[in-house]
Amino acid sequence: MAATTEVEKKNLEEEAEQVVNPWEVSSKGKIDYDKLIDRFGCQKLDDALISRLERLTSRTPHVFLRRRVFFAHRDFAEILDAYERGDKFYLYTGRGPSSESLHLGHLIPFMFTKYLQDVFKVPLVIQLTDDEKFFWKNLTVEECRRLARENAKDIIACGFDISKTFIFSDFNYVGGSFYKNMCEVASRVTYNQAVGIFGFAGEDHIGKVSFPPVQAVPSFPSSFPHLFSGKENLRCLIPCAIDQDPYFRMTRDVAPRMGFNKPALIESLFFPALQGETGKMSASDPNSAIYVTDSAKDIKNKVNKHAFSGGQDSVEKHRQLGANLEVDIPIKYLTFFLEDDAELEHIKKEYGEGRMLTGEVKQRLIQVLTEIVERHRRARASVTEEMVDAFMAVRPLPHMFD
């Protein structure tokens, strides 16, 4: 066997320091996103691309773009080229329904996808991978299906246009052209490649190994003949968190061999836990996240008691040294959710130089989060079972490009 090169050794060491795949995100310190970009082979989203998006859509870029919450991409420039030429494309995103209620981190891709649907006026397919959660979590098929419907209500509450949106669960939809494309993908990816991409081990059951094509094929328009019949050249843009990238590296490798365009991606950072930036939040610790079911009192208690502060341990010291904004979670959360750029910069300056105290910053964050959660709760309360059925009905969308 060939000796391990220095570069390979360095890569293995880096992978041991931070694990990022669709099922696990962990790090010995903060996630190093520059290293992730290098390892995954995607590109950093730059000012020129965001300025071009603003010019083409005549809309202010979403706060998640301005603040680089969505920070990396694959072929996003080609999507903008297509849009500028007047060519159509569609959006694809998804959710693995493993919990009753979503936390704010789960909402981020849907909030951003809603913006993309609005500015580009394009159709959207949303995959609920209830089958994936059956394979990876200790849940019954019936429970996974139930959670898919419950999560669909939260997704619909984000405000998607029903005339341009198809939501489907794998247990309900997989078959026909979708299944044919799955088989085409599966026949072009060797077991060794799957192990290299996803890290499958000998003790993993074959359900897990068989799953990646299921998440791959919504990237191909022919998987949805009721929507895109005769539009096999339609491009696809996938907004997602960067831990989903391995699925689409695989997809982009096989797409040209199947006669399809490679899907483009626009990828986000992870939303940090209240306790600090070492990865994603844990469903097993309700105090690690703000949930869309939290009351105003819950939000206040969680932020005040659990949000990690970069402030100093005494007022005197804080006035002298200021806060460490690099580790301060209230500042991180405001960067995600405070819409006003000028107000955010003011808070960062005042807090960083010690004129503003931790309690004041947390108070502003509590206001911002409470408003978002209350708005979402009101929207979700108006989502009926009939609305879920309507979004999930297999039907043509005659006005999807209007």
Image (cartoon, helix red, strand yellow):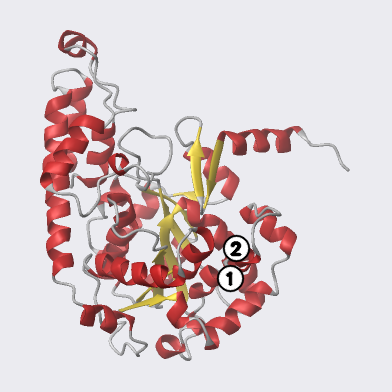
Residue 58 place in picture, x, y as percent = 23, 63
* Dot 2: element: helix
Q: Give left or right: position of 91 versus 205.
A: left
Q: How many marks?
A: 2
User: Where is 85 relative to 208, above or below?
Assistant: below
Residue 166 % position (x, y): 34, 79
Q: Quadrant of residue 76?
A: bottom left
Amino acid type, residue under disc 2 in the picture = Lys
Distance from disc 2 to disc 1, alpha carbons, whole Å, reads: 11 Å
* Residue 365 on image: x %, y %: 16, 38
Bin the neighbour count of mark 1 within 10 Å (Cα to Cα): few under 14, some 14-19, many 20 and up. Answer: many
Residue 153 appears left or right of 83 = left
* Residue at image coords 15%, 60%: 377
Which sits in the foreground, 144 or 110? 144
- Residue in view at x 33 percent, y 86 percent: 393
Residue pictured at 39% horizontal, 63% vertical: 97
Residue tagged 2: 208
Q: Is residue 205 visible?
A: yes
Image position of 117 with respect to 318: above or below: below
Q: Which residue is mark 1?
A: 213
- Looking at the picture, how far across and down is residue 182, in whole percent? 59, 77
Viewer-side residue, 118 vs 28: 28
Label 1 sits on a secondary structure element that is: helix
Which badge, 2 or 1, comes first in the chain's sequence?
Answer: 2
Q: Quadrant of the N terminus?
A: top right
- Tell me the kind of residue under disc 1: Pro
CB atoms of marks 2 and 1 within 8 Å: no
